[in-house]
Image: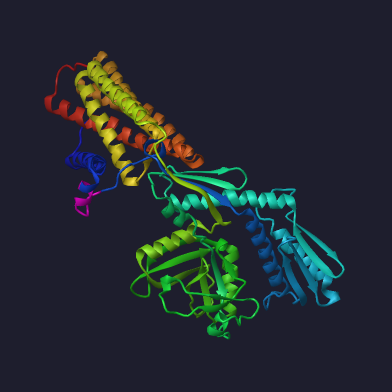
Amino acid sequence: MLHFNKSQTAGIIGLVLLGILFALPNFLNDETRASMPGFAPKSTINLGLDLQGGSYLLLGVDTEKVIDDRMRSIMSDIRREMRPNRGAGRERISINNLTYDDAAAHITLRVAEAGDFDAARDRVRDVTRSGAGALGLGIRPYTVTAEDGRIVIAMTPEAERQFSSEAVRDSIEVVRRRIDPAGNKEVVIAPQGVDRIVVQVPGDDDPEALKAIINRTGQLSFHAADLTVNPSDAASGLLPPGRILVPYSALEGTGRPPMVLVEDPEITGDMVNNASATQSSDGPGFQINFEFDSRGARRFADYTRNNIGQVFAIVLDNEIISAPTIQSAITQGSGRITGDFTPAEASDTALLIRSGALPAELTTLEQRSVGPQLGQDSIEAGAKALIIGFIAVIIYMVISYGRFGIYADIALIANVILIAGALSLMGSTLTLPGIAGIVLTIGMAVDANVLIFERIREELAAGKTPIIAAELGYQKAWSAILDANVTTFLAALIMFQLGAGPVRGFAITLAVGVATSVFTAYVLTRLLAGGYLLSKRPQQLAL
């Protein structure tokens, strides 16, 4: 129990040295960090908005466009339902016109043949029922009325409120994934009213750069290309109905003429489950791999199977990022976007696709860089209180447990260094709740040592030799230490999953502190105590 071989000892010491190495940049100025070798760690712990200030944005969510997009999506589904692909097992229904009145917010459909009217109405009802999305039970998303040879589709007021609320919630999640993909920067993103979002990013004093990240729509879609239309004619205004002229993205290089695409996409970005950047399998550069959900995989397979040899354009934010020719049917539900992407371009584009499209356009209503919410005097007073408390604990452990108290103090200092190193490695943001989590873990680490040392005292009182007493003390205290730390770690995980902002910051420091305190309070002190006992073999132990 007290014996460590050379490799174990080297591993423990090496881990502590790594903690010192990663924590060291926090004590260096910017110039010194910049002059360090490239392989040396340079990341530091970021201070939160309440300690150092940051960027503040108030965003407005265009919920009216959400309703408009929903209606246009339903219209596209209706058109596709009336004109199914070959082999779908349904007859084609001819329609005279299918229009959307954005002022009245309803869709009107007229059927060419009176005998197809009932079948068309039934198909429309099937489409509108499947468009319920995540609406709760009892909420009708759309009303379908059939009269005077026409079918009218309108969204119910309950569905409008629900879709608008969903747009705000989804926008919050998309913004969070874009500016804090790791979930450790303690950003605060919260709704304000029915159609506004507050964004607070600590340590970021450039609201314009933040807006550039947030305001990229991230709208991905896959369109059929219409090569029968001359792009020059289209640019001069001779564009057939249902066609759009789309330029190439800068990622694809400059000088390429725009391409004419079918306006209605075959597949949309909401059907993409995941995206990642990897080294290109075709040569130099990087590529973007993507995976569809079941609906997207089915559409992708059907389209590629029926359109071999045709150009299929991939559009991101109204720019073509790739326009490959379909070589064969792709039925595995995944694909790749190739091009001469740099690692940063591929990674950023994959993140944009993975984080999802903004469900609504966001407008900046207010932006500013804010200073610390707490005065410098308050911060200094808090730091002094933390230092005084830390010194008091160190003195108490020495007075209470002598030599073993010194070992506990060494482990406590190593614990703080390891926490700082781990938070620096993760690039976490530290706020007052995070500091509270560190203080709590320091107290828990001392508790573990107190349990061990008191157990050793009991074994010494029972007549055991110092070495046997120490071995039994560490052995019998382990179960209590493990139970306490596992339950605390699970609580931290729950807070991280369910919390946001400062709650997540507290959870991160608590979880990291639990892991480091178990290592330092149980392993490091056992190494120090074992080294002393096995080398000196004292007959009595002043504990």
Residue 277 visible here: yes
* Picture layout, residue 395 above or below residue 337: above
Q: Quadrant of residue 474?
A: top left
Asked if residue 535 lies left or right of residue 503, the reply is left
Quarter in which the N terminus is drawn: top left
- Magenta stretch: give its range: 32-41
Q: Quadrant of residue 435?
A: top left
Q: Is residue 33 magenta?
A: yes
* Picture layout, residue 146 above or below residue 164: below
Q: Residue at x 63, y 58 (%)?
A: 65
Asked if residue 268 lies left or right of residue 462, the reply is right
Q: Quadrant of residue 348?
A: bottom left
Q: Residue at x 81, y 77 (%)?
A: 112
Residue 408 on image: x %, y % = 25, 26
* Picture layout, residue 491 above or below residue 241: above
Q: Residue at x 22, y 55 (%)?
A: 38
Of residues 494 and 542, the one drawn nearer to the viewer in this rendering: 494
Residue 476 visible here: no
Report the label total: 0
